Image (cartoon, rainbow, N blue to C red):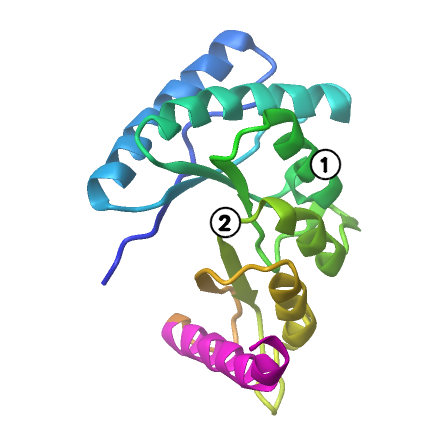
Amino acid sequence: MQGLLIMCDGEGALGHPDAAERTTAVENHHKWVEAAAMLGCHSIRVNAETMGEGAPAEQQKRAADGLRRLTEFAAERDINVLVENHGGLSSDGEWLAGVMNEVGHERCGTLPDFGNWQIREGTSYDPYEGVRDLMPHTQAISAKAYGFDDRGREATLDYTKLMSIVLDAGYRGHVGIEYEGDGLSERAGIRATKQLLMNVRDQLESEYT
């Protein structure tokens, strides 16, 4: 087994409107960077949380400030800081790609989640456009599934299209698996998602070898 990435939640908003709170959030993540380095991981996954205050451009700058400072700390320990689309403005692919451009550090990247595209109730970002927006900055992938049809395909997401976008961007790294459906147990859902990814790999292999 190999440790790759630590998922970090609940450590404060890296884009908090209060500068002191933002600094606290950055410092709260330091222990996870150090743990990742000790365990031989390549990254930690964090959130571009801004508390929803201010115009999108202002929130973008605050998120970039917190992420840049955390990334500078992580880079000294050979660890990447990856941001997932995880609700709010972070589920707007164009906005999150803009945060990455604002940070401007090779150690700060994205972790596109195939399923997390709801910006607010009633408003969602297109998952295919979102993955495409984030791929230039991507250093990990989360393949999320909710349910499957009678042929083993994801019932709401076109995995062949999603993985084609991933591969077209030149990504050849690990693909993590998440199952958030109710129709199968967690273990069965993970196995079904893995099998789906293997089926898509077989389908696309000749095109990408």
- Residue depicted at x 47% and y 80%: 192
Is residue 66 left or right of 50 when viewed as pictured? left
Mark 1 or mark 2, whichever is nearer to me: 2
Q: Secondary structure at mark 2?
A: loop
- Residue depicted at x 76% and y 51%: 125
- Residue depicted at x 63% and y 43%: 87
Taking the magenta stretch, the answer to whether it contains residue 194 is: yes
Q: Main secondary structure of the magenta part?
A: helix
Residue 95 numbered tag: 1
Q: Which residues are magenta?
A: 187-209
Q: Secondary structure at mark 1?
A: helix
What type is the residue that disc 2 sits on? Gln
Considering the image in quadrants, where does the N terminus appear?
A: bottom left
Q: Alpha carbon of mark 1 to alpha carbon of mark 2: how far?
A: 18 Å
Considering the image in quadrants, where does the C terminus appear?
A: bottom right
Q: Which residue is mark 2?
A: 139
Residue 86 numbered tag: none
Is residue 58 left or right of 180 when viewed as pictured? right
